[in-house]
Image: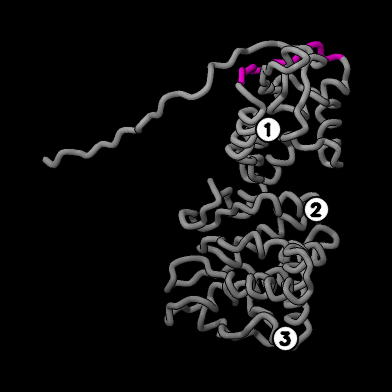
Amino acid sequence: MAKQSTSRLKLNAPLGRMPVLQFIPPAELTVDPSYQRSIDATDSQALIRSIAQHWNWDLCQPLVVSRRLTEEGERLFVIDGQHRLEASRLRGDIAQLPCVVVAYTSAADEAASFVHLNQRRRPLKALDLFKAALASEDTEALAIASALSDSGLSLAPHGNYASWAPGMVSNIGGIQSAWRKQGEAASRHAMRALSEAFEGQVLRYAGTIYPGIVAVCREEASDGKIEERRFERFVTMLALRSQDDWRSDVMLEQAQSSAGYAESAAAAIRGAWRRATSGNEQPASAGARAGTGAALPPFSGRQWCDQCDQQVQYGQACLCRDKHCTIRRAAA
């Protein structure tokens, strides 16, 4: 038997001095403006007010503080936690703050520590925040997760599409935004359209395409519902082209209009849908492009194909590679 190779992690000697945990009154803490970021900006002030208004000890992590000897004597400088410090001062009822106090030899060492702390801090992505909201049983997150499941979609475990299963989505930020702005009904229709149009595919470009799909669904579902035949026609229009084709259309629209990607996706797919519904009422062939005319399917919903041995949609039938597919022959 071949000997298994093992690798051991080479450990460097620990640096610095072990910190001390102390509870310190806010009045005794200060910041060094030579390396600290300014908190005068609007976004910083908004964050400070929000922390102060919704102060939660469960969320108050210890501040990182340096004990430095100055000409005025020993002083305590906050390296990490400036917004929490200012929020506590704004409230006026926070008697002390938990602090990890470290003894640095100079202000330069403090600044270097400040840089390291901020470089190593990885901001949470929308997908991470949504999973946390689910775990905390947030009402909106639970409703969105339920709608995804009802549509045959699921939440991707991470942002690397190369290892996703078909039907997984990670564009949860865009989905949440549409849920709030376009409404639950339009969002549910859009999720179903995305799922059915690209069924069996890894949804690599869902984040780019989805805003356009939900924009059309919002217009079509004025009373919360979309007529099934028109919905099937819309799904067919989407299915007759690849995700990459739709992404190219969105990118082209964005380059021409200089609008945001959500607005560009809405303009691109809405324009294709209007062209598809303004032509004649003849069924589209398998090679038809979305913007060249009508795409009215000869049937709505799903029909059973004995050759494929499954329920098949019209859009799937047009793209089926089995030349003996009975539904494909009917669609042609």
- Between the residue at mark 3 and the residue at mark 1, the CA separation in whole angstroms equals 47 Å
Q: Within the magenta stretch, is there residue 116?
A: no
Q: Position of residue 117 (x, y in %)?
A: 61, 33
Q: Earlier in the sequence, mark 2 or mark 3?
A: 2
Residue 48 in percent (x, y) is at 83, 31
Q: Position of residue 171 (x, y in %)?
A: 64, 53
Region of the chain picked out in magenta, as a range = 93-104
Q: Nearer the viewer, mark 3 or mark 1?
A: 1
Find disc 1 in the rendering and name its residue.
137
Three-letter code, disc 1: Glu
Question: Is residue 323 positioned above or below 69 on the image?
Answer: below
Farthest residue to the front: give it: 71
Tell me which corner region of the image, top left, top right, bottom left or bottom right, holds residue 236.
Answer: bottom right
Residue at image location 86% in from the left, 14% down from the top = 93
Q: Residues within 10 Å of mark 1 (few under 14, many from 20)?
A: few
**For this rendering, which residue is in front, 141 or 281?**
141
Q: Quadrant of residue 196?
A: bottom right
As measured in the structure, the alpha-carbon distance from the residue carrying label 1 to the one carrying label 2 is: 20 Å
